[in-house]
Image: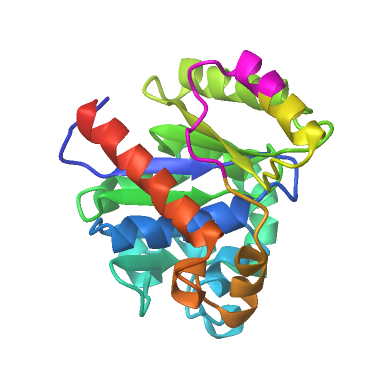
């Protein structure tokens, strides 16, 4: 690990869609903030769902993560302060959709985001990156810029599908661009202990990642799925909900892991 004083950068990624990636990005960010950690959410998904998850209007953005990464706009100019405790957002919108193609011709194209975040790491305790659901150049930039990769996995059939590809990408980035990157942890989402299938999937994932599974699991929870339509993280929509509490627990696990290490 690098300098202890610098913020920890966590990329939330799984190229499989629908695994709770954005839900995790939004709620983990809000939870870090609530636990007194100054946190920045960097939205790298062109759909901009984690941007709207904090009530930010994607259509009215003066600048976004696209401007920071592609146009080299100073990162500070792209950051939006939210009304939520200790939380800032570097928002995203559809302009990011063309970034993959624009990055292809750039020199050191895997390192653009790392340069953007370098100055910001002094200002935040945690920087959470919401990656697009693919293993393209934008996700590559996120893995090259982060300290830890957090992988949300839905408890369903084919849960491990595509994971070996993701792990191979992380290893490759570690070798070529970022010797410090590690797997932050694997987070089980949409967990329903009543289903036999869930329990089978959990066993399978434990075999695959024996040391890396978070103790906390994220339950199937209506409040978690309702909160985004109100532009709020779950804890500010319904703080007593199981989903909101689970994300607070995950944030606590990450904080104590990093303060120990």
Q: Position of residue 205 (x, y in %)?
A: 66, 23
Which quadrant of the figure has residue 169? Answer: top right
Which quadrant of the figure has residue 157? Answer: top right
* Left or right: residue 179 compared with residue 160: left
Tell me the quarter of the image containing the N terminus: top left
Tell me the quarter of the image containing the C terminus: top left
* Left or right: residue 245 compared with residue 201: left
Which quadrant of the figure has residue 9? Answer: top left
- Whether residue 195 is in magenta: the answer is no
Q: Nearer the viewer, residue 126 or 95?
A: 126
At 64% from the left and 67% from the top, the residue drawn is 95
| Above or below 18: residue 51 | below
At 57% from the left and 74% from the top, the residue drawn is 52
Q: Position of residue 170 (x, y in %)?
A: 56, 24
At 25% from the left and 54% from the top, the residue drawn is 124
Q: Position of residue 82 (x, y in %)?
A: 37, 76
| Above or below 101: residue 164 | above
- Whether residue 215 is in magenta: the answer is yes
Q: Position of residue 186 (x, y in %)?
A: 55, 32
Magenta segment's dominant SS is loop
Q: Nearer the viewer, residue 246 or 8?
A: 246
At 36% from the left and 39% from the top, the residue drawn is 254
Q: Nearer the viewer, residue 95 or 20?
A: 20
Q: Which residues are magenta?
A: 203-217
Asked if residue 219 shows in the view, the reply is yes
Given the current orientation, which residue lies at the most extreme left position? Answer: 5
């Amino acid at each position: 690990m690098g300098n202890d004083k610098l913020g920890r950068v966590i990329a939330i990624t799984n190229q499989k869609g629908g695994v709770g990636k954005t839900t995790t990005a939004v709620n983990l960010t809000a939870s870090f903030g609530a636990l007194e950690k100054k946190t920045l959410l960097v939205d790298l998904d062109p759909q901009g769902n984690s941007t709207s998850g904090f009530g930010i209007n994607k259509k009215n953005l003066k600048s976004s993560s696209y401007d920071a990464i592609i146009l080299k706009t100073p990162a500070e100019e792209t950051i939006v302060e939210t009304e939520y405790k200790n939380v800032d957002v570097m928002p995203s919108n559809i302009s990011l959709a063309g970034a993959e193609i624009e990055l292809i011709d750039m020199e050191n194209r895997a390192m653009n985001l790392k340069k953007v975040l370098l100055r910001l790491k002094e200002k935040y305790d945690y920087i959470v990156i919401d990656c697009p659901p693919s293993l393209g150049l934008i996700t590559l930039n996120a893995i090259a810029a982060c300290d830890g990769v957090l992988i949300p996995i839905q408890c369903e059939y084919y849960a491990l599908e595509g994971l070996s590809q993701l792990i191979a990408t992380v290893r490759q980035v570690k070798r070529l661009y970022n010797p410090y990157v590690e797997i932050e942890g694997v987070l089980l989402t949409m967990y329903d202990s009543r289903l036999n299938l869930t329990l089978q999937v959990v066993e399978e994932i434990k075999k695959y990642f024996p040391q890396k599974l978070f103790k906390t699991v994220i339950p199937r929870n209506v409040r978690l799925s309702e909160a985004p339509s109100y532009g709020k993280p779950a804890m500010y929509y319904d703080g007593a909900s199981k989903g909101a509490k689970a994300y607070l627990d995950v944030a606590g696990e990450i904080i104590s892991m990093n303060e120990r290490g």
